[in-house]
Image (cartoon, grey):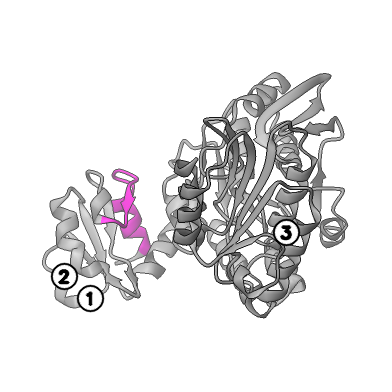
Amino acid sequence: MKIEDLYSLYTEHFLVDTDTRKIRENSVFFALKGENFNGNKFAKQALENGAKYCVIDEEEYNVDDRFILVDDVLKTLQALSNYHRRQLKAPIVALTGSNGKTTTKELINAVLSKKYKTYATKGNLNNHIGVPLTLLSMTLDTEIGIVEMGANHHNEIAFLSNIAEPDFGYITNFGKAHLEGFGSVDGVIQAKSELYDFIESKSRKVFVNPNDPIQIKKTEAIDRVLFSNEISFVEANPNVSLNYAGEKVESNLIGSYNYNNIVAAITIGEYFSVNKTDIISAIKSYSSNNNRSQVITKGSNEIILDAYNANPTSMEAALSNFNNINSEKKKVVILGDMFELGNDSELEHQNIANLVDSLSLNSKFLVGSNFNQISFNGILFENFNVLSDYLKDNSIENSLILIKGSRGMALERLVDLF
């Protein structure tokens, strides 16, 4: 089947599904494959659950005209999403970076949705499957699309850019993330800058933090919009406050590292002519509820939960911010392993341990097999269960607690122990 014909079936309801447990009525089901599953085997079930068509790539499951046999389901999904993107009249804003992508994406969406009908990446569906699904979730009356792009190897951002064909690009920062795949920080810069390469090749536009010399250098030849100069930092104690449009604006986000994320959203909002009053309202009302920089009160404790992800750059930023918070409570740090650091893992974990040791803290705990390979003046725990048992027997009270670790550590489980 030609992609144009498949697109005609898709536009009957503009619904695409890939999980038989979450089938929507009249959707097109794409039978994706993974290391441990084969979606072709569930195509019939998808129809029974409400799908109208199933895209498959194994002949034995091609039972009737509701099944659409293609050479490769994933490539077909990607091709369909790119075809759909070309039918959309909405400009696409794409963003990537080592830290802050999801929070920035949500802030941009909060601001732009004050004036436009927007659609933004849900959660962190930002890879070779998530980006196509994001595009296919946009309808012809979407006015602005916001697409988050993630990567842990070279050429992934270039690939995703060719699918989404963004009109605007933004890179949050270059940090020590996914070093195992990128090889070095220089590798990170090269890989993330594939978004810049695409924007430049199409003579499109980027938003740039003027205080980041690397980004300024990388975008010299690109049509760019620099951060608004009407904004200034006030404090992060712990919530980020800033001056904007003659008003002190206090956000619900903690950590000075979120300041640039907010400024990016304001700058993009201004570019798209969102009223400043609406921009301020969006910034004030946005709250993170996805284990990113959440402040949670449990009994006599205040918990800063930042357990969605971690890398050396974000760890350093979180610790620096935590150290600068004025609090009468005792200060406690609980950090979990950082993943995908390759040969730099031991060095980077030792650097974070040294930083923790240098801070004035009442208690400091490190957990995970990587942290257990280094020297540390606090308490080391081999895994989550050992730490959990310790906290059950040694209660922490009247404390300000920072919890941060990579997603695989799932340290948000600690909240129930306080």
**Quadrant position of residue 83:** bottom left
In this view, which residue lies farthest toward the front? 393
Residue pictured at 31% horizontal, 59% vertical: 5
Disc 1 versus disc 3: distance between alpha carbons?
Answer: 44 Å
Q: Hey, what amino acid is under mark 1?
A: Glu
Question: Is 356 situated left or right of 228 in this image?
Answer: left
> Do the residues bearing badges 2 and 1 touch, measured as CB atoms within 8 Å?
yes
Front in this rendered view, residue 75 or 34: 34
Residue 16 at x, y percent in the picture: 33, 51
Residue pictured at 69% horizontal, 56% vertical: 315
Residue pictured at 61% horizontal, 43% vertical: 103
> Do the residues bearing badges 2 and 3 touch, measured as CB atoms within 8 Å?
no
Above or below residue 257? Residue 388 is below
Q: Comparing marks 1 and 3, which lies closer to the viewer?
A: 3
Residue at disc 3, secondary structure:
helix
Residue 20 at x, y percent in the picture: 24, 55
Residue at disc 2, secondary structure:
loop
Q: Earlier in the sequence, mark 1 or mark 3?
A: 1
Identify the residue under disc 3: 313
Magenta span = 3-19
Residue at disc 1, secondary structure:
loop
Above or below residue 26? Residue 150 is below
Q: Hey, what amino acid is under mark 3?
A: Thr
Identify the residue under disc 1: 58
Identify the residue under disc 2: 62
